[in-house]
Amino acid sequence: MQINSEIQTLDKVIVHEPNVGIEHISPEIAEQLLYDDIVFLPRMIEEHYQFTQTLKQLIGKENVYEFTDLLQETLTQDAVREELIEYLFEKEDFGLGKYELLKQLSPEQLSTVLISGVHPETKQSILAPLPNLVFTRDLGCVINDYILVCKANKNARLRENYLTKFIVRNHNLFQPFKNKIIDFVTDENLEKDSGISIEGGDVMLVNNRHILIGESERTTLDAIFELKAILFEKDIVDYVTVVEIPNERYCMHLDTIFTLLSAETCVGFSPLLYEKNDKVDIVTYSKNNARAVLHPTLKDLIKELYPTMNFIACGGGISPFAQREQWTDGCNFVAAKSNVAYSYERNIKTLQSLRDNGFTIMNSKHLLSEELSLDQLQNTIITLASAELSRARGGPHCMTFPISRK
């Protein structure tokens, strides 16, 4: 398994359906759990199910992995289960009573509790929920034939990293990455003053030798330089471009303001990435230790890599639609294959721009009803219902953790 760019045909992907833990978010703790609002869970599940059903239709049911299932299968190994509970007890310090309770749970029950925080039978709230796990992209990413296990910036997401670390180390699915794991979930990086955090939404492999990493609200420069050193030392890439973006909620990750659909098309938030401004710095470092190269805009850099690239502006590049649709993930596409990608249906100005540039806009329900295959789709944007999903502040790119493309 490997990934050489964001725009290859999707082969295997990890997703996570919203779960009952989200119902335990109250207004008092919403901000702490990184939610801006109280979402309507049944509708959110319905919207996410529509997304995963189309993925299964396009790339095969067996290639769409649910995070909960991977965790449960990992926990069937007695030694691993004991080690994980000990690890969580040490890192989260949730008390002896809860520690002993977790030890008594079956793998299925334990996987549910560790993710939702809720006991599946008693409905008792045991641990804090992981409502952001629906955005599996931030857990890690595959860089050629290596896998990066990320370390979150916010405490609310750290257990997601702990669980991912154990799954990647112990589940058979990840055997191809044995001895090729770049693990940022270390005791040193977990120190409060480490200055190290990196999330998958900030990491984009634009081709097999060039990677973009956003310095953002969630990914620190210290982490980027640590990763850069590893990538160069192991000869994984030749170029690392740092894209410094504002430390603001509206652009928490690089993939919230820019994503690739193909070598010919990308969608971005024009005020930050297509126009020269003092809010964004773009610097490329090379493995051969040549002098760092500064780029006026991301558009200039992408044009060097893909000379025929067509740049689509989120919201048509017109204020206030650009700002409105960027907030509701109008730049956050994920490619199923070159020029076939997912978007939220609510970003109508962005979709109109794509339609004007030769794309067919297809509702996911139509895709399912017609039982269309990936081979039958060309220059197509598949739209997803998003009344509740978008309120959780993430789009289709955020909701996918690709582990293989071909």
Image (cartoon, rainbow, N blue to C red):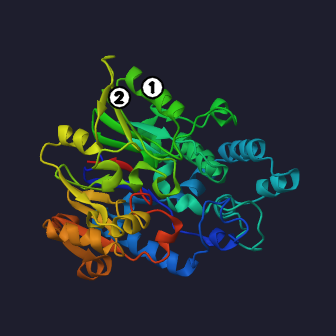
Report helix, strand or loop for mark 1.
helix
Spatial separation of the CA atoms under disc 1 and disc 2: 8 Å
User: The disc labelled 2 sits on which kind of residue?
Assistant: Ile
Pointers 1 and 2 in contact (C-beta within 8 Å): yes
Who comes first in sequence, dot 1 or dot 2? 1
Q: Which residue is mark 2?
A: 236
Q: Residue at x 55, y 80 (%)?
A: 42
Q: Is residue 179 visible?
A: no
Report helix, strand or loop for mark 2.
loop
Q: Relative to 325, say whether 332 is above or below.
A: above
Q: Is residue 218 visible?
A: yes
Of residues 115 and 34, the one drawn nearer to the viewer in this rendering? 34
Question: Percent x, y for residue 149?
Answer: 51, 41
Question: Percent x, y for residue 25?
Answer: 68, 69
At label 2, counting other C-alpha atoms closer than 10 Å, the crowd grade (few under 14, some 14-19, many 20 or more) is some
Query: Which quadrant would residue 334 be assigned to in this image?
Result: bottom left
Of residues 31 and 4, the one drawn nearer to the viewer in this rendering? 31
Work out which residue is located at the far top of the displayed protein and give it: 289
Of residues 69 and 334, the one drawn nearer to the viewer in this rendering? 334
Question: Percent x, y for residue 200?
Answer: 46, 46
Q: Is residue 284 left or right of residue 134?
A: left
User: The disc labelled 1 sits on which kind of residue?
Assistant: Ile
Q: Is residue 201 left or right of residue 297?
A: right
Q: Relative to 239, say whether 248 is above or below.
A: below
Q: Which residue is mark 1?
A: 230
At label 1, counting other C-alpha atoms closer than 10 Å, the crowd grade (few under 14, some 14-19, many 20 or more) is some
In which quadrant of the rendered image does the N terminus lie?
top left
Q: Residue at x 27, y 62 (%)?
A: 317
Q: Is residue 77 left or right of residue 371?
A: right
Q: Is residue 67 left or right of residue 28?
A: left
Q: Residue at x 40, y 27 (%)?
A: 231
